[in-house]
Amino acid sequence: MHCLVRQTQRLSCWLPAAQIHTTAVQRTFWEREKKSGYKTKLPEPSKKQLIIDGLRDLKKEIKLWRQEVKEKLESDPILVFRPGETDIVFDFKAPDVLDKWTVTTDADHGEGKSRATLELSASGAGLFHGEVSSQHTKDGIIKRTGYANIRTKRVRKSFKRESTYDWTQYNMLIMKVRGDGRSYLINLHTEGYFDLMWNDIYHYVLYTRGGPHWQIAKIPFSKFFLSSKGRVQDRQNAIRLDCVTHFGFSVAAKKGMDGPFGLEIDYVGLEYDPSHQEEFAYEMYKTPKYIVAT
């Protein structure tokens, strides 16, 4: 014991105190969790409640597994591959469709005063509406805010297995919408396995005309550009359509556009257009390898 104390004293004399770190590393590229600090604490259920919920969901998960096996056996590329026809992916006339979407605003994290809801309109379509405000919390940290967002919940297979959408056989995104004249941002999340790719999102702008008439928006997937944490990336690449995890819309209160908004969505579909041959719309530049794309 005395020898150990004597060695420790010698080590403390030999090494400066500033070089001995006893706390966790703060400066690192590693992300601790996917929400980057935006995490809502929920009450944890008891073990008894977990068992009850698991037995209740067992029948539903087995039914979902049978449906997966049936779709796998019946899938035929010749029947699925139909140029010029629109396959609807998100139909707001389907039952329990609102349960598959999540609505978020800056007010959910105590950063702003925007509000938004997603409900069915009188015509039976999905109505994303509310009010965006650029007024932010005066805490000395938040500088800009004012947004509202909807996105689908993570697609999954049976028994809580996370999955992705596979849209590789399509090259067009088709939407029937009715807006208020605002510009909305279409978001295709491609959440990757590593923490560096948790926030990868592909965007494109949806311009709405306003007025009482519906509009059909046909957008090639080659037009979508990559961003991460709100920053457009220097190194762009075409979206991998077999890795889409979420789909959604965003609206912001930029350039004095505070006030009410409304976007009515009838359906979102996919299409293969043989006449569209473009793979990626944006020119790439060669940058030195030591430059990190941010």
Image (tube, rainbow, N blue to C red):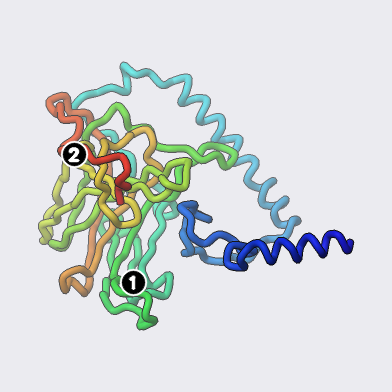
Choose between 220 and 84: the one closer to the eye: 220
Identify the element where label 1 is drawn.
Answer: strand
Density class for disc 2 (Cα within 10 Å; few <14, some 14-19, many ≥20) is: few
* Numbered-mark total: 2
Residue position for label 1: 115
Choose between 258 and 222: the one closer to the eye: 222
13 is higher (above) or lower (below) than 135: above
Residue 259 rendering spot, x and y as whole percentages: 21, 74
Residue position for label 2: 285
**Residue 91 seen in this snapshot:** no
In this view, the mark in front (2 or 1): 2
For image coordinates 15% across by 45% down, the residue present is 216
For image coordinates 33% across by 60% down, the residue present is 149
Density class for disc 1 (Cα within 10 Å; few <14, some 14-19, many ≥20) is: many
Q: If the image is split into quadrants, where does the N terminus sit?
A: bottom right
Choose between 36 and 13: the one closer to the eye: 13
